[in-house]
Every structure is written in C-alpha cells, then in structure tokens.
Image (cartoon, rainbow, N blue to C red):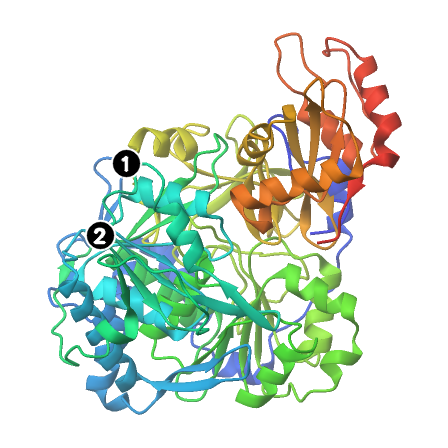
Amino acid sequence: MTRDTPDTLGKGDVVSNESLANLLKEERRFAPPAELAANANVTAEAYERAKADRLGFWAEQARRLSWETEPTETLDWSNPPFAKWFKDGRLNVAHNCVDRHVEAGLGDRVAIHFEGEPGDTRAITYADLQREVSRAANALIELGVRTGDRVAIYMPMIPETVVAMLACARIGAPHSLVFGGFSSDALAARIQDADARVVITADGGYRRGKPSALKPAVDEALTQPGTENVRNVLVVRRTGEETAWTEGRDVWWHELVDRQSEEHTPQAFEAEHPLFILYTSGTTGKPKGILHTSGGYLTQTAYTHHAVFDLKPETDVYWCTADVGWVTGHSYIVYGPLANGATQVIYEGTPDTPHKGRWWEIVEKYKVTILYTAPTAIRTCMKWGDDIPAKFDLSSLRVLGSVGEPINPEAWIWYRHNIGGDRTPVVDTWWQTETGAMMISPLPGVTEAKPGSAQVPLPGIAATVVDDEANEVPDGSGGYLVLTEPWPSMLRTIWGDDQRYLDTYWSRFQDRYFAGDGAKKDGDGDIWLLGRVDDVMLVSGHNISTTEVESALVSHPKVAEAAVVGATDPQTTQAICAFVILRGNAAEDEGLVEELRGHVAKHLGPIAKPKRILPVDELPKTRSGKIMRRLLRDVAENRDLGDVTTLTDSTVMTLIQSKLPGAASSED
C-alpha cells in the first residue's frame, strides 16, 4: 500500500484511478528461496486440490487435529450465513494444543520461551503447560465456572494469560479477552455484554521500564451497572505492587491455582461449541462481540500457521509480537502455534525498552526463525535507523510475516533487507477478527512476492473484488473485497445479536461476506488491500470506531458536538483527527485540547487518543443534517475540497481551513 493511497473509501468512491496507477508502478518481484521451495510444507498443488474439492480440502485439514468423534459432515450451510463446520465432530481445543503433544512424546519440547520486560525469563515445556493448564482448569471449576459460562481476561503478556485461555477452553467456558490498554469503561462494557461470571487479571505488567497497574481498572469496571454477575476476580501477582482487595470476591492466582491437582481430564465438546468472544469496534459505537467456535476455527488457524509460515516444529522458533488481547494473539500466539506443537517466544514489553534494539536482541538470543509483526512496528524501526538491527545477528530468520494493515512497499523492502538479510520471504497476510484466521497471503515456498500486496487467497478460500453492483472487477481495477464462500474459522455471529451480524457483513452484497475493506486487482489478478471503507479507523493495526471517539468527546462537559475522521499517517496508517464545537462558555486554549485528549484516553484507552483536535464554530453538514466527514478528511490531509454544493453553508469549510495551522496535535 503506497502512502498516497486513501485509507478510507466512501460508498461510490471505490478507488481513484490515481491510486491504482500508483500501485501499478510497483514492479519489484521476489522469488521464493530455492531451498525453502524444495522443502515447503505446502506447494502449488494445494491450490488445485482445494479448487477441485473445497470441502474435501478442509476435511483433510481437520484430520490434522485430534477428534474424540471424527466429523462426517464438513459444512452445514442450510441456513446461510449461519455456518456449521464439522458439526457432528467432538474435540477439546486445549487437548489439541497441549495434551496430544505430551502423549506423542514431546513433553520436553519448549512451548514458550517467556521474556519479561525487566529481563526475567521462563522456559515452559509442553509437559509444564499441561500441568499448569490442568491446575487452572481445576481452579476455575472450584470457583463455580461451568461449561458455557463466560470468563473475562484482562491481562499483560505473560504465560498465565495463555494458561488461562487454555484452561477456559479445556472446560468449555468461552473466554473474552480485553486488551490491557483499554479503559475501565471499555472493560465494563465488554463484561456486561458477555455477562462474564469471573474476571482473570493481574496486579499489573511491565511497560517501558516500570510497573503498569491493571487491577484498578477491573475494580472500577465492576462498580458499573450490569457487572453484578461477576462472582470472582482471579489475580496473578506479576509486579508485586500494592493492590486494592475485595474480600470474598478477589482471589490470588498463586494461592488458588498452585494448590490444585495437576490432573484434569479434558472433556470433548461439539465442534460448534463457543470457544471465545472477542470485541471489535463497530460503526454504531457499540463494540461487536465476535463469536468463534471450536472445530472450524482450530482447523484453519492450525493449517494457516503451518502453511503460511512453513512451520517445522522440530527446528523452528516462532515469534509473533502481537498482544494476546487482539485476534492475532488468539490465533497466532495461542491456538495455531500450540496446535502445531511449535516452540515460540512471548515478550511482555515494548520494542524500545530498555533500548531500541530489544526485539533484535531477543531474535538473536532465542535464534528466532519466523517473525510475525505489524507494519506500524516496522515503520517505527525504520524511523529509528538501520544501524540498530545491524548490531545483532539476525541470520536465524527464514520467514518474515506482516499483519494488521496493508504494508507499504517501502516498509516491505526495508523489512526484507534490514531484518531478513535480503534472503527471507515476506508473507503479507490479510485477515480480520471476524475471519478468525489468515485468508489472503503469499505462500513462502510458492509465491513470487510483490512488495505491498497480500496477493492471493489461500487454498480453500474464495475471495474477489467487486464494484458497487457486486460485479467482479477486471484486472487493473478497484472495488470492494468480498468473500464468496464460507470458511471454517469464520465468525458465527455477533454475540447476542444475529440481526447485527446479518446487517453488518451480509447486507451490502447478496450472499457474500463484505469485509469492509477496499481492494484492487493488479494486471495479474493479485489483490492489493486499500484500507477501510466505513467509519472504522485503522490506527497502528487496531480498529477504532469514529462513533466511539465522538461519543467520548461529547461526554466532556465543554464539548457540544464532535466529528472524528481518520487521516492518512505515515507512522500509524491512520491518525485520529477530531473537530469539536465547544459549549458556549468554554474557552479555546492549548490546555483544553490536552484535557480533551486525556478525556478520550480515560474513556477508551490511550490507543484512541486523538492525534489532533481542532475546535471549530460549525461542522460541515448536508441539508439533511449529516456531517460531511469526507470534507473533514480532505482538510485533515491537506487535499482540495472538491464539491461542497450539498452543504447547508459552504463557507464553513473555508473557516475550518483557515484555522487548520493552529490545530493542536501530539506525537504520543
């Protein structure tokens, strides 16, 4: 994705010819390394096999798992778009991720190399993991957690987070992870929607060299209406900082879990048993609880992890730098890698603590062979300079991956050259919280890679680009990315709201899943992703709803009205820009802008803090009263405004433009 490609595309404004022309100029190509291609897990033949018999292909991948009852029916699509995959099969997800490897004689293999930000380390074998997950499962049962009960998890990046997830899966209690950077309000909303019975958290974690508390946000969240059904808070001691305590509700992990039996027999559940709910931003502002189930999800995460990274579990050391609170962490730290018996690194902290070479120091230390990270992180490392990774031995790396947003060709080339030594394939993966697993990506032993392009749907996946009328666009044209056939790891619904599931994903194009992303096909028919087309902003790989940020701003007593847009940003893909109308007696000053930024951070978390806030007298509105966000985006990106004839008062935009140099912005 080039930097002058618009990230947000309105309906009817599919992709400009100028944008397509810019992308079509990318002519660099990189063939797979010969040795990798010769020994690749997945070859070109997989595409043909999947095309000839798509359901047979996925049934074959399901057989890579351990089933108590083998499924006889691959897909029930009798009530579209509500899919049931492998519905008569029964399995236990935690058994597949842990016990079966121990039973196969691999108990001594390291599952997790944990690197804490302060420098503390742990090596956890599959046998260790089996013992810890069994203890945690027994602890949850002692707390009264039953099959089907929801458990909220609000944790730092530590091994206990993985153990907690697997313990929930082991007893059939769907987990709902909430990213530790989210505020108490955001946490409360997710606890309420999922109706969680237990919250698992920690006193805190380490971030940028100091303890960062988590438990206070849980305490605050549980004072809010709708959280009364939470019976217990299970607390991991990570930092040792003093922690407020509610007797009878709060329980220390080490006191409860450590005294449990190491024996626990996992129960098999139906393939469609809910595994987890993960919340993502919605355009209405209310987060959507994406529901994923067990058999299909695990089939596709395990297969794609095996195929896209060419994983050799006997020799590879894998590292995904995502937070486990996001879907990337669910699918490609916990479920996919562990189902495949991988050895992986989990790192708690930030890439610049205590120095800007920390990631590369970790790669060198553990001899990481596969690295999966986000374009935002790659661009940050580019900004810090080539000399930093050059100080470390990165020769162990053999496959590099990118996730979270389209990667611009310059960052792709930098990543391959400075991190991969010009020898590693780069797999640019497209997928979503909703898809559950990778959908579009090069295969490292097959695909001639194009910098900036996710390229081709993986074997067994049906995706294309269509125009406004749902017609497939010709090569060289742009439109909307759609998925035309169901896939095993697809979301089953939005938790508690089937109608919203239908309206959000299946109403725009009949019988096709609309991903919400703009895309183009190049002259070869390969797919290039162009970012969101709706009112969801993509900031550092995280989806943030404009409505949520607007609502947070308007909840401030000095703000009467707010409009928020995502403006193209070279560092974070999009930056949040807010235009606010102040209440009558509120004074416009630098202090107020910082106050508003802090207010949004308190309500939604630091990730949602606007980079720029501009107080204005009026907002551009159509005669029907709709805010013209397109014009605000044009202003934020210093573009010509174009047609303003539909505005009630076209002079509004002139006034806003005249104030723009005074807009307060921040780098943090």
Task: Give the x, y percent position of residue 420.
Answer: 66, 78
Q: Is residue 338 left or right of residue 555?
A: left
For mark 1, give the secondary structure.
loop
Q: Is residue 49 above or below residue 345?
A: above
Residue ID at (43%, 61%): 47
Of the two numbered discs 1 and 2 on the same chain, state the one appearing first in sequence: 2
At a point 28% along the width and 36% down the height, the residue shown is: 496
How far across and down, in percent of the image, does residue 315 sit? 44, 89
Against 497, is 49 above or below?
A: below
Q: Which residue is mark 1?
A: 496
Do tag 1 and tag 2 residues touch (Cβ < 8 Å)?
no
Q: CA distance from mark 1 to mark 2?
A: 22 Å
The numbered dot on residue 157 is none
Left or right of 93 on screen, residue 600: right
Left or right: where 129 falls relative to 382:
left
Q: Quadrant of residue 589?
A: top right
Q: Is residue 221 shown above or below 592?
A: below
Foreground mark, 1 or 2? 2
In the rendered image of this protein, does residue 126 appear above or below residue 661?
Answer: below
Residue marked by disc 2: 231
Residue 441 lies, in percent from the top left, at: 52, 60
Classify the position of the C terminus by image quarter. bottom right
- Measuring from the top left, give residue 573's x and y in whole percent: 68, 50
For label 2, count other residues whose C-alpha is less than 10 Å away and answer few (under 14), some (14-19) or many (20+).
some
Q: Secondary structure at mark 2?
A: loop
Tag 1: amino acid: Gly
Three-letter amino acid code of the residue under disc 2: Arg
